Image (spheres, rainbow, N blue to C red):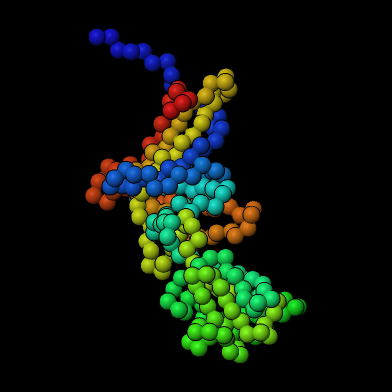
């Protein structure tokens, strides 16, 4: 049988962009994160060199071992999946998850104030204190929940709470606005937790790229960098909490300790631009 002749032999190419970085669970190959707004991607390798010299100190050769690699990029948008990976945790999604709520609400003429959500927590004590906001936007007197207040008309310095109707009732001398902090279920919610002992898992990565032929830029080639083992670096995570903020990440490429010939990554380029 005659061998198929291949004319495609990519070498020098124009890299248009990194289309996406995908993170997979090593055991199940399940996708755990996908990042598509990639800026400043960088793939680096390094090795430890041991120089061999003769009796006069002349260099004979250098052996390179302990080869390592890193893959860095910045996502132009804040990513909860990426944060979960950096924090060594998983993203939680639930419709009945409670979260902290802070509200500034108006005390009406009947001395009541209406919350946006139903407060949750210890029954009868879902909210334990409320701050009055003065006319100059400074905080004024603190009102606390008491057993007597919850049973009827609040006394001086206290307020009554009816959680089911989302209603706070104040003494007659309270007017204007009050500041309230409580926990509530507000709808579909996502949560990512950073704990002091969370360790990021080793994952596999696929880095998808688009290339162009330099002699005919209409020719588009699909590329992918396959990284079989990578652990995200949690040592210096910075989340810029501004609208212009970016989300940077760095991965340490790891070979399997028990595999002496393990690879750090493969680079594939295909003439199929839809790959």
Name the image quarter holding the C terminus.
top left
The residue located at (65%, 77%) in the rendering is: 110
Q: Is 43 left or right of 3, judged from the image as shown?
A: right
- What is the residue that sits farthest to the bottom in this orientation? 156
Give the answer, above or below, for where 274 lies relative to 122: above
Q: Is 273 left or right of 77, judged from the image as shown?
A: left
Residue 53 appears anywhere in the view:
no
Between 146 and 98, which is closer to the camera in this rendering? 146
Give the answer, above or below, for where 130 lies relative to 207: below
The residue located at (46%, 26%) in the rendering is: 274
Q: Position of residue 198 (x, y in %)?
A: 38, 64
The residue located at (66%, 84%) in the rendering is: 172
Q: Is 185 left or right of 68, judged from the image as shown?
A: right
Give the answer, above or below, for where 93 lies relative to 273: below
Q: Position of residue 220 (x, y in %)?
A: 52, 24
- What is the residue that sits farthest to the right in this orientation? 136
Between 271 and 158, which is closer to the camera in this rendering? 158
Q: Position of residue 96 (x, y in %)?
A: 42, 60
Q: Position of residue 245 (x, y in %)?
A: 61, 54
Name the image quarter holding the N terminus.
top left
Give the answer, above or below, for where 156 lies relative to 2: below
């Amino acid at each position: 049988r005659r061998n198929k002749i291949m004319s495609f032999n990519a070498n020098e190419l124009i890299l248009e962009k990194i289309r996406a970085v995908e993170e997979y669970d090593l055991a199940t190959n399940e996708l755990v994160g996908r990042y598509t707004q990639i800026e400043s991607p960088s793939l680096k390798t390094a090795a430890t060199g041991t120089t061999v010299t003769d009796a006069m100190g002349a260099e004979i050769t250098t052996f390179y071992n302990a080869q390592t690699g890193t893959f860095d990029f910045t996502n132009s948008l804040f990513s909860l999946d990426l944060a979960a990976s950096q924090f060594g945790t998983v993203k939680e999604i639930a419709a009945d998850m409670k979260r902290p709520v802070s509200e500034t609400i108006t005390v009406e003429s009947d001395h009541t104030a209406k919350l946006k959500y139903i407060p949750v927590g210890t029954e009868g004590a879902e909210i334990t204190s409320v701050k009055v906001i003065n006319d100059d936007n400074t905080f004024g007197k603190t009102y606390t929940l008491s057993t007597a207040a919850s049973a009827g008309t609040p006394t001086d310095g206290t307020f009554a709470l009816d959680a089911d109707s989302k209603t706070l009732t104040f003494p007659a001398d309270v007017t204007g606005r009050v500041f309230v902090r409580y926990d509530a279920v507000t709808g579909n919610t996502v949560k990512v937790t950073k704990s002091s002992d969370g360790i990021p898992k080793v994952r596999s990565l696929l880095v998808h790229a688009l290339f162009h032929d330099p002699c005919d830029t209409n020719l588009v080639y699909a590329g992918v960098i396959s990284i079989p083992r990578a652990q995200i670096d949690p040592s210096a995570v910075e989340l810029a909490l501004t609208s212009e903020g970016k989300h940077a990440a760095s991965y340490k490429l790891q070979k399997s300790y028990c595999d002496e010939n393990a690879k750090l990554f493969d680079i594939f380029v295909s003439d199929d631009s839809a790959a």
